[in-house]
Image: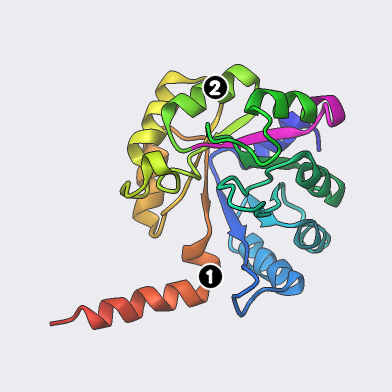
Amino acid sequence: MNKDEILQRIKGGLIVSCQALEEEPLHSSYIMSKMAYAAMLGGAVGIRANSGQDIRAIKETVDLPIIGISKVVYGDCPVFITPTIREVKEVVEAGAHIVALDATDRLRPDRLTLGEFVNEIRKQFPNIILMGDVSKLSEGIECEKLGFDLIGTTLSGYTEDTKGKKLPDFTLMKELNEKLSTPIIAEGGIWTPEDLKRAFDTGVYAAVVGTAITRPMEITKRFVKAINNFD
């Protein structure tokens, strides 16, 4: 698939994030590949996956565009979604069609600016589709200037500047869509079909849903919390 074909395939559709952290019961590349297969059968147009191992397993199982990330924590640096060129290489070599990375204005672990990092990526992988995960409008504007192919609202509510923001951040979706020409991907806090419809009503290009579909422990906690709140 070339870039235009990949972007066309995800347009107007649901991308399912299939990720399980190390401490979670479903942490397994095999399980994530089956989760992705179930999502594909349900109508997902793409998958978001974490780590080269998971990406490879999912790519062998489904014929869908894959947004690849690699979450690695470097010391006390808050940037951990594909933070350095090492993780970009891991994701690209695993076969991801799109590489997503933290595109906030926070300092990266290798001390590179976002612009320097993007230049390094483009130099090594000139044809890769890049998605910038942002938390606010100014970061989206910077992503467009740097030539990102997609911009996601992924990190709204997860940075110091946006801590406590109500999710999904429909306001950010709308602002990005109105002010930028780059396709916007809604991501973060989408729990219901109603949330999803409202996200698309802001004009976004596609949407990612993860926890509400693929993290049963978190889904169970939500229901238990509701029980505990009964009068």
Reply above or below: 150 against 47. Answer: above
Taking the spot 72% from the left edge, 51% from the top edge, the residue there is: 64
Q: Does the magenta stretch include residue 130?
A: yes
Distance (Cα) linking label 2 and label 1: 32 Å
Left or right of 27: which side holds 122? right
Q: What residue type is labelled 2?
A: Glu
Q: Is residue 148 visible?
A: no
Q: Does the magenta stretch include residue 25?
A: no
State the residue position of label 2. 142
The percent position of residue 84, horizontal first and vertical second, equals 73, 41
Q: What stretch is highlighted in magenta?
A: 122-134
Residue type, numbered disc 1 = Arg
Residue in view at x 72 percent, y 40 percent:
98
Q: Which mark is residue 178?
A: none
Q: Which residue sits at x=69%, y=45%? A: 82
Query: How crowded is the residue under tag 2: few (<14 C-alpha within 10 Å), some, or many (20+)?
Result: some
Q: Quick one: quadrant of the C terminus?
A: bottom left
- Please give left or right for residue 55 compared with residue 141 in the image: right
Coordinates of residue 224 in the picture (x, y in percent):
34, 81
Q: Residue furthest left?
A: 231
Which image quadrant is residue 41 in?
bottom right
Give me the residue at 33% from left, 35% from top.
171
